[in-house]
Image: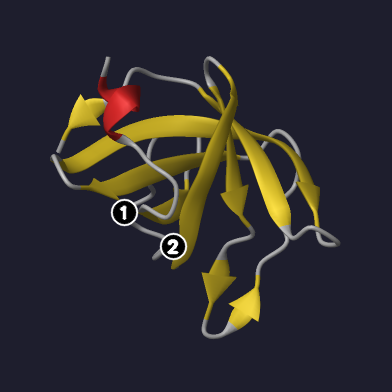
Amino acid sequence: MSQKFITTGNKIELCLTKHGKVSVKEEQPTYTSQFMQWTEEYVAQIAVPIYKGQHIGMSSGDEYLLTFYTTKGLYRCRAVVLEQSMQQPTTAVKLASEMEKY
């Protein structure tokens, strides 16, 4: 499984999706984050995303397209936000699709 290639500190780019697809009509911003750890098999703890130098609040249930930058190349999957803690600052996301080499 490609999850084993993802390690602490790997860069992640996130883009909000609508119904599992990135909207072409609406230009969605791309947020930057870092992978922290796997807390469960398909649940990842990531740093709170940043956009233009500001932390981005994410709502539970929102779906994002995640692109992981690893030493083995780029991997993509969809993920759903479970919860976000600004005190930590971390976000828990659950993978909603298989990781694919990008």
How packed is label 1: few (under 14 Cα within 10 Å), some, or many (20 or more)? few
Tell me the amino acid under the disc marked 1: Val
For the point 44% across and 47% down, the residue is: 8
- Residue 18 visible to the viewer: yes
Using the image as rendered, state which of residue 45 and residue 55 is in the foreground: 45
Left or right of residue 5, residue 19 in this image: right
Residue with the most extreme front position: 8
Q: Which mark is residue 24?
A: 1
In the displayed structure, 30 sits above or below 78; it is below
Using the image as rendered, state which of residue 14 and residue 27 is in the foreground: 14
For the point 61% across and 35% down, the residue is: 93
In the displayed structure, 54 sits above or below 22; it is below
- Quadrant in the rendering for residue 86: bottom right
Q: Which residue is mark 2?
A: 28
Left or right of residue 89, residue 40 in this image: left
Which SS class for mark 2? loop
Left or right of residue 56, residue 102 in this image: left
x, y (%) of residue 77?
Answer: 35, 31
Tell me the amino acid under the disc marked 2: Gln
x, y (%) of residue 79?
Answer: 51, 32
- Residue 20 visible to the viewer: no
In the displayed structure, 81 sits above or below 31; it is above
